[in-house]
Image (cartoon, grey):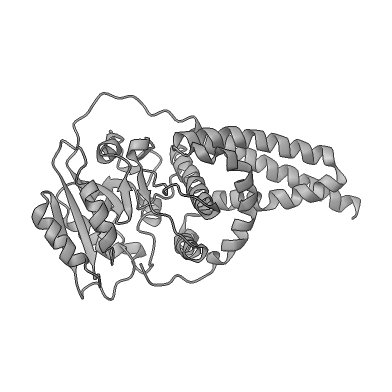
Amino acid sequence: MSFTVITILLYTLAFVSSSLVFYYLYFFARLASYKPRHKAPADQPALSIIVCARNEEKNLERNVPVLLEQVYEAPHELLVVNDNSEDNTKMIMQWMAREKEGLKLINMEREAQLNIGKKYPLSIGIREAKYNHLLLTDADCVPASNQWAAKMQSAFGPGIEIVLGYGPYEKQEGWLNRIIRFETFHTALQYLSYALAGLAYMGVGRNLSYTKALFSKHKGFASINHLPGGDDDLFIKKAATATNTAIMIDAEAHTISQPKKTWSDWKHQKTRHYSTSKYYKAQHKFLLGLYSLSQFLFYPLLIVAFVFNWQLAAAAFIIKSVIQYIVFSNAMKKLNEADLIKWIFVMDLWMFFYYLFFANTLWKKEKKTW
C-alpha cells in the first residue's frame, strides 16, 4: 500500500473518530446530563388519550384497563379506534365501553379499506377527541405507571406544543432482546438529544403527545397520506420547531412494549420504521447520515490503521471509547436502561453489521400495510 493511500486512510480514521466524538459531546451529552426544569405545579390540561388498533383483541383486553387506571385529576377520556379488525376487537371493546367510564370506542368499517397505514384511523380519533391535549400510544403498549399521563402532560408549558416520550421494550432473556432494547435506546438517544438541541425530527407513536390545534394547523397528515408510515416521525418533522418541543424521560412516563420474538419479525418491523427516513429534511438526513456512516466505517478503518500506525489507531480507539462510554452509560441511566451499560462496546461493534442488515431500507419501496 502506497504512502499516499496510508495517509488518506489515517486521516479518514481521524475524521471519522472526531465526528463520533462530536456527536457524543454536542448532541448525546445533552440527554446524558439532562435535568428537567423544576417548575411550579400547573393545572392539568383536559386530555384525550388515543389508541388505534387493528386485530389487537388480546393486547386491548390486557392494556386498556391499565390505561383507564391512570391517576389524572383533570377531565380526560380514552378513545380506542378499531380499524377494520377481523378478530373480536369490536365485541370486546363494546363490552368494555359499557362497563368502563371514560372509554369511547370508534369502529371503522369499509370507509377505511382504501386507506393505508395508521394515519387515517388516528386522524379519525383526533377529530373525535373532546380535548385539545392529545396523548398517543399503541395497543401493544402498557404505561410503566399510573402517573404516565400526568407526567407526560407536566412537560407542557408556555409555547410547548409537542412532548416526546420514551417507549422501551420489556426486558427478557436472549441476545435478540438485548439488541432490540439497545437499538431502541440508541434511536431514542438520537431523537431526544436532537430535540434538546432544537432540531427535533421524530417521535415514536408508542409515547407521544401534542395538541389538536397543532395537528389542525399543519392540516394533519394531508401531505403524507400517500405513505403507509410517518404518523409519528414525519408529522413531528413537519410540526416541530426549535422552541415548541419538550421531552419527558421520567421512568414513570415510559410506555413498555412486548419485543419481537424472532429475527425475521424484528427485521420486518425495523424495515417499516426506516422506510420513512428518506423523507426527512435535508439537514436531518445529513446529520443522521454522517453519524451512521462514521459508525459504519470506524471499526474497518481502525483494523487497517493498526497495521500501519498502531499508536494513532490506539489513540483514536481509546479517546472515542472513553467518551462514548461516559455519555452512553449516563444516558442509559436516564432512560432506565442501566443493565445495558455492560454491553455498550459489544453493541457498538454490532452496529457495523446492523447497518449492513438494514441498508436496503434506504431504497426499498414501502408496503402498504399497518
Q: In this orientation, which residue lies closer to the viewer: 302 or 181? A: 181
At a point 16% along the width and 66% down the height, the residue shown is 91
Q: In this orientation, which residue lies closer to the viewer: 179 or 225? A: 179
* Image quarter in which the N terminus is found: bottom right
Whole-percent x, y for residue 50 in the image: 24, 53
- Would you say residue 155 is visible in this rendering? yes
Residue 304 vs residue 38: left or right? right
* Image quarter in which the C terminus is found: bottom left
At a point 28% along the width and 67% down the height, the residue shown is 55
Extreme residue toward the front, this view? 173
- Would you say residue 26 is visible in this rendering? no
Task: Report the number of numbered marks.
Answer: 0
At a point 69% along the width and 42% down the height, the residue shown is 17
Whole-percent x, y for residue 272 in the image: 45, 64
Residue 39 vs residue 340: left or right? left
Whole-percent x, y for residue 271 in the image: 49, 64
Snapshot quadrant of residue 79: bottom left
Whole-percent x, y for residue 235 in the image: 36, 55
Extreme residue toward the right, this view? 2
Q: In this orientation, which residue lies closer to the viewer: 184 or 292? A: 184
* 276 shown above or below 250: below
